[in-house]
Amino acid sequence: MNKTSNYQLNQWELHDRVMMQDFNADNAKIDAALKAEVDARAAADAAETSARKTTDAAIQAELAKRGNCKIWTTGYTGDGTHGAEHANKITFPGSPIVVWIFDQDSRVMCIGPYKGSCLNYMSGGTCNVDWKGNTVSWYLATGTSYSQMNGPNMAYYVVALLRAD
């Protein structure tokens, strides 16, 4: 009697005697091979699912950080000075994205991390900005303490968006 090359299953020839135990042995081999394949695929699927869940969780954690920010507020009282030697400075509890400063007369200055400058809506001019870690300082090369948002004894209100991560 001949046998198959992979699983050694019986291959009868015309003169071979067909026996029940040969069929049962072949069926047991086929059953074992199918079971091994099913088990291997299930293990591979479980590993892939586990890896996907880990990857998905990491992606979701990263996505949760995107577009989110913290709002932080503070205030200060101006001392009447201005110019490079009297730069205003604020240190934040996190990394600032953008900062708005309002005075008591509703004038506003916006400081963003673009080109190292800010936009002062009161004077329509720009000022010099230095971003270092969580600290932002600024001054106007020309103008007054009021246009630098540092008028004497004036109350200033600060609203900042800080990175969430």
Image (cartoon, rainbow, N blue to C red):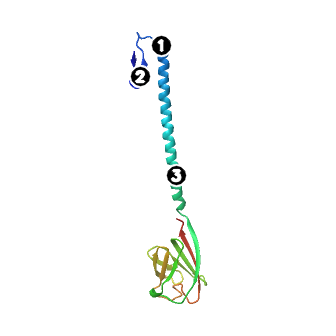
Q: What is the CA distance from the residue labelled 3 to the residue labelled 1?
A: 55 Å
Q: Which residue is mark 1?
A: 19
Name, please, the residue furthest toward the top: 15
| Mark 2 Cα shell of 10 Å, populated few (<14), some (14-19), many (≥20) | few
Seen in the picture, residue 58 relative to 91 is either above or below; the reply is above
Task: Please report whichever mark, 3 or 1, sits nearer to the chain's N-terminal start.
Answer: 1
Assign the N terminus to one quadrant of the image.
Answer: top left
Q: Which residue is mark 2?
A: 8
Q: Which residue is mark 3?
A: 56
Query: Which amino acid type corresponds to the residue marked 3 in the rendered image?
Result: Asp
The spot of residue 96 in percent (x, y) is 51, 72
The spot of residue 118 in percent (x, y) is 48, 78
Task: Give the residue at x 58% y 73%.
Answer: 72
The spot of residue 152 in percent (x, y) is 56, 90
Q: Nearer the viewer, residue 43 or 100?
A: 43
* Element on which disc 1 rests: loop
The spot of residue 92 in percent (x, y) is 53, 75
Residue 67: image quadrant is bottom right
Q: Mark 3 vs mark 1: give the one in front.
A: 1
Q: Nearer the viewer, residue 70 or 123?
A: 70
